[in-house]
Amino acid sequence: MRHHLQLRSKVIHHHSHKAGCRHRFRIPETDSREIQHRENWLQLIENQTVRKSERTSVFLKSITSDSTGREIVKDTDTPAWISITLRLAGIYNLLWGLWVVIVPETSLRVCGYPEHIAYPQLWQCIGMIVGVYGVGYWIAAGNPVRHWVIVFVGLLGKLLGPLGFAISYAQGALPWSAGRLCLFNDLIWWIPFALILEHVARQEPVFSTIPRLSYSEAIGKIRSNTGQTLGELSANRRLLVVFLRHAGCSFCRQALSDVAAKRAEIEKSGTSIAFVHMSSDERARHLFRKDRLEDLPRFSDPDQLLYRAFELKNGSFSQLLGPAVLWKGIHAAVFQGHGVGMLDGNGWRLPGVFLLKDGQILAANRLQTAAKRPDYESLCQTSFVNE
């Protein structure tokens, strides 16, 4: 709520200034993690007129704060069927889990397991896990856009469950009758859960109400951790600008590793490197340090003003969560050792790479899937043709 009041005071000051009032604007004390973000936002308010007062009013009414004090926007555009579906899923999971916990052996026989098992407590544990998912679905029903990760994890479990059954059946470990459990617990939810995630992918869940910067404004106003703008960094030289996905994404970490491996060749060609990310600089710093890239300029862009100015869009369900993308994500996280972190930013935003010189885009690669790995060296060579 403290941030809500601070944001309201900024907008009130902006409108008072337009009316000729001479109120002095005081910046409340803040911690180091938010200083750069606040300065970028203040520059936006001071240099761009908010022409639609209704939009500002809707923004203020929709702002709330979560338990950490970060501003979020209420989900007001979700179709009713989405909330109904998630509430039904929550009720089903809770009832099924309760049934399994109370009468484990009876529920086993009904679910297609005719033989007595030695440890029914394991089956009861599964019931408790399914019941906990029900609580998650009920919470997600209140704001599916904000809590899309719960839906995604649920769908992932519903995809892997039948896969595990198929493997066990092929090995003779489970009877065919046990497959009826997959029908009601997994298969019937595939389409509605996928459609919910598709709806979320088309939204701008937090950032759509923030005024947009033009390309020239974005590269001239937003500053990096070193205090320079993209316009200044690209003055009289080529600059490779790498837009990352959120810091918890395996592909974000893979991209940093790829750039680190090619850094010498890129810089040998006379091209400098800069990064744009969605986290606070404090949170992102350890990722850059891991690949020895902490000395390069990086832009903290939690409001995604630069992402939108460079026309990087939200991806579709298949672009972010398709089978090929999921497999490459598992490969990057597990086999390449990049791991997976907490969601920190807009998980639907696609990445991209750009070549700039004197503020002009010489070459662009707006990636079409989250898993795409650009050829940074080739992009640098392309710039010679365009110069």
Image (cartoon, rainbow, N blue to C red):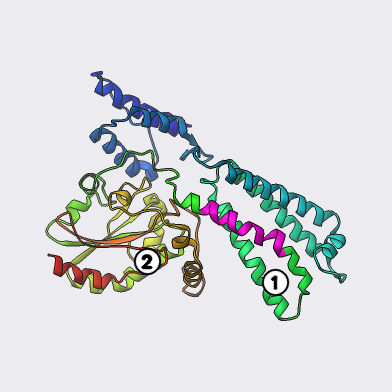
Residue 111, percent from left and from top: 80, 63
Relative to 268, residue 368 above or below? above
Residue 185, percent from left and from top: 70, 59
Q: Secondary structure at mark 1?
A: helix
Asked whether, in this view, residue 257 is left or right of residue 112, the answer is left
Dividing the picture into quadrants, the one containing residue 258 is bottom left
Asked whether, in this view, residue 353 is left or right of residue 140, the answer is left
Relative to 275, residue 329 above or below? below
Q: Which disc, if any, is residue 190?
A: none
The disc, 1 or 2, on the residue closer to the chain's N-terminal end is: 1
Which residue occupies 59% across, 44% down? 81
Check disc 1 and report the residue beneath it: 165
Which residue occupies 75% across, 80% down? 172
Dividing the picture into quadrants, the one containing residue 256 is bottom left
Residue 291, percent from left and from top: 37, 67
155 and 305: which one is in front? 155
Span colored in magenta:
182-197
Q: Secondary structure at mark 2?
A: helix
As measured in the structure, the alpha-carbon distance from the residue carrying label 1 to the one carrying label 2 is 35 Å
Q: Is residue 337 magenta?
A: no
Q: Amino acid at mark 1?
A: Phe
Looking at the magenta stretch, what is its main secondary structure?
A: helix
Check disc 2 and report the residue beneath it: 255
206 and 30: which one is in front? 206
Dividing the picture into quadrants, the one containing residue 38 is top left
